[in-house]
Amino acid sequence: MKGADTRRPRCAGKVACVEINVLIEAATRGDARALGRLCSVVERGDAQARILTAKLYAFGGKAWTTGITGAPGAGKSTLTSGLVEEALVEGERVAVLAVDPSSSLSGGAILGDRIRMGAHAGNEHVFIRSVANRGHLGGISIAIPAMAACLDGLGFPEVLIETVGVGQAEVEIASSADTTVVLVTAGWGDAVQAAKAGFLEVADIFVVNKADRGGADATSRDIESMLDVGPVLDWRPPVLQTVASKGSGVAEVWKAVREHRAYLEAGDERARQRRRRAAHDLGSALRANLAHSLNTEEPASDLLDAIVTRRTDPWSAADRLLQAR
Amino acid sequence: MKGADTRRPRCAGKVACVEINVLIEAATRGDARALGRLCSVVERGDAQARILTAKLYAFGGKAWTTGITGAPGAGKSTLTSGLVEEALVEGERVAVLAVDPSSSLSGGAILGDRIRMGAHAGNEHVFIRSVANRGHLGGISIAIPAMAACLDGLGFPEVLIETVGVGQAEVEIASSADTTVVLVTAGWGDAVQAAKAGFLEVADIFVVNKADRGGADATSRDIESMLDVGPVLDWRPPVLQTVASKGSGVAEVWKAVREHRAYLEAGDERARQRRRRAAHDLGSALRANLAHSLNTEEPASDLLDAIVTRRTDPWSAADRLLQAR
């Protein structure tokens, strides 16, 4: 298998390949319908999706991806919408991937949020895609990073990924972005130490939203003191305050995203981060493939059999897989 | 690489191998010191650890592992201690793996908890191991499941894994157990929807602890209504109430663990779960190996290079790895 990394995946069928090439060409010109169809292909997660991703990945690596996550109702869509405007002011094209918690408890708020985001719907410099968090092979852990990589390859300089931080997958996706913005609501109590601690690991920037309510300063102080007791970091996440619904403080958040980018690009931190992301995306993909193998006659199926029947153990098997390339 | 799954790893050195065999023999006889030393070997995550895990994995598959997770201060150690007593009453030997949030915000509570667990310290039917959540290769995502597999292989019929559900890794570990108990405190507010939703995915049993405080019934109702709006499950997690510090309700939790086990073992659900766990543990191991490759000249390092330089993409690389065995 040595040297196999340089192989380009071949087209599964001529028609599909031609169609994908046509779509890519149209999408590169900014055709929103073509962009939408390409995203649908990636979302399906099938062989054609893999061909598309492999094609576009080769052209990527230029976009900056910003993840925006936080509890339901924290105002993520409103902030995201504001960040889109900031990017537009800079003359950048922006793509937004928003994970809809489809089966979710908080489903009620989503429609309203999407409508608000709809302010950008007619703008040809903005591409918005809602992705349901159920019902595709490998799940959103693959679909969203793969889609972001494709939008990168198609020339979008800014990709925003908005996920509700209520499950492992969602937090993980947001944290796989170049810059991760964690949104909390003013007045967070002690009771959410758990959630805070989970977020603490992934945040590059904290935003205390709805700062016109009481308790914003106390919440900011809470976060700052958590950062104080944590490990000393080269990049200490700034803690900002916004009233996203009024646009207040949003420019400062975008500025912080830029500063985080400048920080990463200044030293050799960026190179390290690229390797971290490669490891992260590959790890997610392997895990999703394995999960998929559970229900199919996929290649990994006999490996799982070997573990289940205790002919090997997961840790030795992992060593061998990565050594066997 | 076909057929490689049946190979037994060879000893790295004769001395190490002899020593490990002596330790295994002593540990099988119930020697606590030998058990502790074997756990230390697994924790190191080095080549010797891999030899040990591979050896013991072959003898495992009989233990029932129960994960106990929840926010800091929810009373996990107290409940775990109570469950140990229940298992002892049944005449079972019990191993407890407790993840210490070493760098953590809530570090203060830990010492007290450990002292309480110390009630079992002299009992030769109980083995308790605290594991720091920092400072070993691959992290606790590998160390804990591998240790649990070893204790299984050494003949412990019950393995309890206690983790603070404040980070992805911790929740993931608890959810990799056969039965996952999620502990919440009476009086949880709406503000923790986020945490709840994260827990909802992994819980087989909910326990509302400190039920002698106000709000226990409201909290139970909250959880029940979340379960109502969620997908219809073959196993609907029961929502129990405890005052773990007084031992009240703990027997019912243990009974629920037994019922969950009976449910899994009755149908073909158990076989499916074994495959799920194999996929899960293999996925974690691959991910941890990749993370480890970031800082070393490990075999996977050139694969990461290929992704970073865009000669391949993570999703195609994952396909190829799992197909290349």
Image (cartoon, coloured by chain):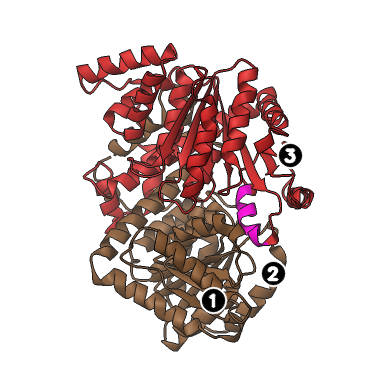
Chain colours: A brown, B red
Quadrant position of residue A224: bottom left
**On the image, numbered disc 2 is attached to which residue?**
A109
**On the image, numbered disc 1 is attached to which residue?**
A217
- Report helix, strand or loop for mark 1: helix
Q: Decide if residue B194 is in sight here.
A: yes
Percent of width and height locating residue A134: 62, 54
- Report helix, strand or loop for mark 2: helix
- Magenta residues: mostly which secondary structure? helix
Residue at x-position 62% and y-position 22%? B87
Estimate how packed mark 3 is, as few (under 14), some (14 to 19) or many (20 or more) residues with alpha carbons within 10 Å: some
**On the image, numbered disc 3 is attached to which residue?**
B240
From the image, state whether disc 3 or disc 1 is nearer to you.
1
- Magenta range: B191-199
Q: Decide if residue A299 is in sight here.
A: no
Residue at x-position 30% and y-position 22%? B9
The amino acid sitting under disc 1 is Asp
Output the chain of dot 2.
Answer: A
Q: Nearer the viewer, residue A40 or B300?
A: B300
The amino acid sitting under disc 2 is Ala
Picture mark count: 3
Compared to A305, does A170 lie above or below?
below
**Labels 3 and 2 within one chain:** no
Percent of width and height locating residue B227: 74, 48
Q: CA distance from mark 2 to mark 1?
A: 26 Å
From the image, state whether disc 2 or disc 1 is nearer to you.
1
Residue B101 relative to residue B224: left or right: left
Residue B13 relative to residue A52: left or right: left
Compared to B245, does B27 lie above or below?
above
Residue at x-position 47% and y-position 84%? A251
Mark 2 and mark 1 lie on one chain; the one further toward the N terminus is 2
Q: Let me know if residue A61 is in the magenta part.
A: no
Output the chain of dot 1.
Answer: A
